[in-house]
Image (tube, coloured by chain):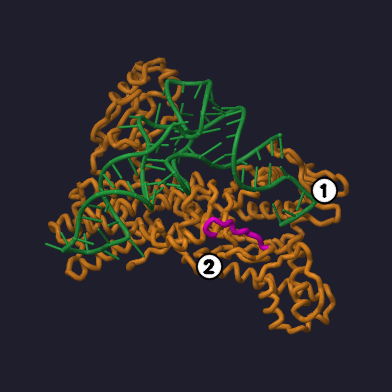
Amino acid sequence: MNPIQHTKGLISSKITEALELARKEGLIKYNSVPDFVIEVPREKGHGDFACNAAMIMAREAKMAPRQIAEIIIKGMDINELEQLEKVEIAGPGFINIFLNNKWLHKIPFIVEQIGDSFGYNEARGCKVQVEFVSANPTGNLHMGNARGGAIGDTLANILKYAGYEVEREFYINDAGNQIEIFGDSLEARYLQLTGHDVEFPENGYAGQDLIQTVKNIIKQYGDTLCELPKEKRRNLIIEHALEEKVAYIKKTLLDFGIEYDVWYSEKTLHESGVVQQVIDTLQEKGYIYEQEGALWFKTSSSEEDKDNVVMRANGLPTYFAADIAYHQDKFQRGFDWVINVWGADHHGHVNRMKDAIEALGYKRDMLDVLLMQLVRLYRGKDLVRMSKRTGTTIALDELIEELGKDAARFFFVMRSPDSQLDFDLRLAAEQSQDNPVYYIQYAHARICSIFRQAGAAGIKMPAVSSIDTSLLKEPEELALLRKIADFPEEIRVSAQTLAPHRIARYVLDLAGLFHSFYNRHRVINVEAELQDARLLLMKVTRITIKNALSILGVSAPEYM
RNA sequence: GUCCCUGUAGCUCAGCUGGAUAGAGCAACGGACUUCUAAUCCGUAGGUCGGGGGUUCGAAUCCCUCCGGGGACGCCA
């Protein structure tokens, strides 16, 4: 149920009908009805909806826009739209449509009836996969992972509400070069901690967390691994460490409110031979050539200016090769749409990835990559380096402990993914009182309090069907209803533009409208029928705030 | 050098699939609690939308160019 889209659709079809009627009567000439827009004007004085059809058609019809608007209005079957108040021509040729409040007064009944499901759009029968975070299991989760987590999970929720069938996936990079380095680092630490004089590899992972991991291994095996053949010892340590790291990632993300449907291992792609197979497939199709001992993938995109290696001269496939196999597998699993949330530093991989899936026979727009700008971490004015090697950065689990899940998630998703996020730890900790998330949660808690007060005073909301919502006439009440009516449309647009921050903004605005209402009007102890109507208004406001917060992964407390 | 993101109020940012008089929060100033939570509300002030061209009936939004900030350009992932 999407009231705004529904109303826009009604108006749009009335205008189209009017135009076709006018052409039949010879009042206007054109080939086809253009793609006009029904939009919500910024200015209240310009009506509830406005249409630009007349201006867009002016050139083709060779008529003044206002004259065309005149014809459209005359031809509109106004009586069929019961909510219609009046239609005006304004400015350069806008058709402004004013509705009476009947449609707004229906909103509470709709919302109350569908409750937790308010916000959902019609099912689309489209399977979409969102892959996000996919952090290397060689270290702790950093702020970039955190932002990716908040954005990816929120986006997945939005898509679900927008009518898609959604799966969340984490790609575990448990193969390749970095695992070799990981192994070298672990082994060196193990030998060092068991009293051997070995050098730590120059490019190894020096993080403290790795030392802890090795200590855990020693707890289990003591120094018995020193006696084993090198290869055996290494594999055992790696296996053990990976298991621990993945468990840590899983737990931390769960604490962050994120639960995946699938954890997908890169290693299995290599072991099952799929990586080799996909290279063979591409070779058969003529996309692969050999040069200097390596196999190269021929790029078809004009935007990609050079080809990329899939098989190194040493016979090992590259990360890119595994990624091609991985994406093929995604589509073979039946996803119609695949979304990856990547850091902006990976933007150079987008086109080659699209080239690859196209070479495999899929459409390049079946893959969308949401690039998010990176997070820079500050303590006051000082930039905190985010390096896994030094291990000095703050990890996601520490952040959650410091700020709480709610504030952290809201903060990471509040801004557009396109904008770089400067995260000042000191400020975030100091400002926790002013954090917008509390403003929203406070609105929810206040509404809950109203119902507690009403309950204590023995006030009960009557059967919803007997409530007269037309008593809600105050500007603050109408503004709230209008905003609530927007919710499903806001979700639809957020999904379409992959813009999770829109929901954060939406619920912030909604909370603001509630606070304005609350300060101006009373719910309890007003005239009985108005009290009922306002109780219902409060109920649906609470439902909408709660649903929006749940999309963001933020809790809706009843007390504060 | 090529490519991506970005530049909007003192600060942090919305708005960018073109629409009418560019918004919010913070900070500043002035107000509002004997009644449902003052973690709130109301008001005032604050702008060459980085500069310059262009397309259009109409540009913060699209195109070109220049300037500033961030990032990517590996047989690393």
Residue designated by label 2: A254
Q: Is residue A559 magenta?
A: no
Q: Position of residue A336 (x, y in %)?
A: 58, 49
- Residue in the image at 55% along x and 49% along y: A420
Q: Which chain is orange?
A: A
Left or right of A132, for residue A74:
left
Q: Position of residue A457 (x, y in %)?
A: 17, 69
Q: Main secondary structure of the magenta part?
A: loop
Query: Is there a contact, CB below 8 Å, between mark 2 and mark 1?
Result: no
- Residue in the image at 36% along x and 16% along y: A26
Kindly indicate the quadrant of the structure image that contains residue A461. Answer: bottom left
Q: What secondary structure is found at the residue carrying circle 2?
A: helix
Give the camera-side residue of A320 and A195. Answer: A195
| Relative to A418, residue A456 above or below | below
Q: Position of residue A41 (x, y in %)?
A: 34, 36
Residue designated by label 1: A295
- Residue in the image at 77% along x and 64% along y: A180
Which residue is most to the left?
A: A527
> Which range of residues does the magenta coloring cover?
A379-388
